[in-house]
Image (tube, helix red, strand yellow):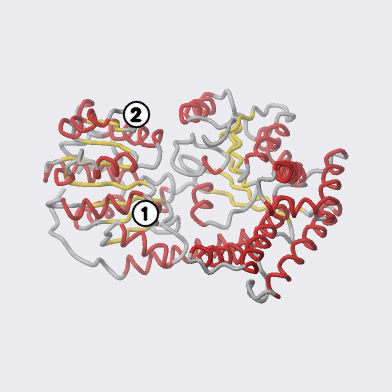
Amino acid sequence: MSDDYFEHPLIKKNRLEKRIYQETIFHTTVRNNTLVVLPTGMGKTVSAVLLAAHRLNKKGGKVLFMAPTRPLVEQHKRFFDKFLEIEGEDMKVLTGRIRPGKRKKEYERGMCFFATPQVIQNDIIAGRIDLSKFTVLIFDESHRATGDYPYSFIAEMYMRRAKDPRILGITASPGGSEKDIKRVVENLFIDEVEIRTEKDSDVKDYVQNIDKQWRKVDLPEEFREVKGLLEEAYSERIKKLKNWGYAPTGKVYRKELLKMQGRLRKKISKGEGDKMLYAALSKSAEAMKIEHGMMLLETQGSSSLYKYFKRLREEARQGKTKAAKSVMKDGRIATAFRKTSSLLDKGIEHPKLDELKKIVEGQIKEKKGSKILVFSHYRDQVDKIKEELEDIEGCKPGEFIGQAGEKGMSQKEQVERLEKLEEGIFNTIVATTVGEEGLDIPAVDLVVFYEPVASEIRTIQRRGRTGREKSGKVIVLIAKDTRDEAYYWKSKHRERRMKETLKEMKNSGGKQQRDLDEF
């Protein structure tokens, strides 16, 4: 290896910059199945390129790189194209759009394959892919290796069939709890964990500074009036569930309601249901709907709550759910609906919107050519935010949403939207959760969380959209004395626990050692 670049027969000369931490991680991946946890923008995919080059050179065979979405799969293929000395025809993107018979032939011809896990799972089951010929499998966004997601099945089949298997999992965050992390490690047959944080000595020289701020706002008194009505209706239903012996004592939040509903449905499925049990299930469904309304009011605003009330009213009219009908019959909910409509008539929205407009306007004035990314969990609020940002001089906002629903964006449209951000046609993107994971969003100067999220994975992914090649800024909007504050601290604690758990796993060493072949 030269001083500045990795040198290897299968890596293009003077192309892949050498970094000490990547060399260290590479040597671990050579020995063992490895989970690599790196901050976004620190070169997780470089670990995949280095290991693929090594295994192809030393062991032969084929490489399989999996990622959750087709645009992400194509992005990784372009990355390999850029750095590997492998003919283009030997690198193949396989999606469900390619006929199964053709995919089977491609597996026989190619060397490096890039695919979504659903395609690979289907081809394993149908016998179209021979996993014994693959010398390395790479799982991008490997925190998904839980539950029914195909990653777990693919890893197990590979370990059973491959003669000399090697697995690499890459992610910015594998989970917040030790249980979550261990599940990923077990499902991907991981032997070693390699984690780096922004504070590690061998990484910090490459980390761009990210200015992290949070801005707190007070809910207006009019919001508190509506919130009081919703809380009263909610508490009445929770009290009944407690009196019936179904709800736990103490505070009952969404998490407890979901657990309770799961227990009730399990009993019904076993034929144990009686009138009281069905009544409890119905009452808990009502409580969930009211709780969701409270959450929208606290964290999103009157526009989102009003649209939600309208949908509930339509559900009730059409008789879709008994719970919606019961909720909309409640006089307190009817009053809350009227008051919310009045808020909109008076132009009283969530104070986060005004704060957001000040932030975006200030960024555009302060730094010419700024690119801004605003995250909001709900599609209704994305529409509202975009509409408000259009009033700012110099702001050119565009939406970035998922595929579901009538107004959803196809993956092709998502890619085109990001290209327009890169070209400057848009300078601000307002995104739902689809913007958090995977897609190659151009480096932005400012990321704004319209609301904190309790998930440390989503927080890390949102934050990782800035500070990649240059310093950036992250601002989190928080409504005081609401669940915003609880979500913010929960995410913070879960991220700290995640890093502590991973460090412990790294320091404890691997479960098994394999012979090291030199690069």
Q: Earlier in the sequence, mark 2 or mark 1?
A: 2
**CA gap, disc 2 and disc 1:** 24 Å
Q: Is residue 3 left or right of residue 470?
A: left
In the foreground, 427 or 296: 296
The residue at 22%/52% (across/down) is 157
Where in the figure is residue 127, as x and y percent of width and height? 20, 41
Question: Within 10 Å of the Cα at label 2, are there few (<14), some (14-19), or many (20+) other Cα atoms?
Answer: few
Q: Amino acid at mark 2?
A: Arg
Question: Can you tell which mark lies on residue 97?
Answer: 2
Q: Amino acid at mark 1?
A: Ala
Where in the figure is residue 17, as x and y percent of width and height? 30, 40
Q: In this rendering, is residue 112 above or below 507? A: above
Instruction: For mark 2, give the secondary structure.
Output: loop
Residue tagged 1: 145
In the foreground, 430 or 312: 312
In the foreground, 339 or 485: 339
Q: Is residue 240 left or right of residue 335?
A: left
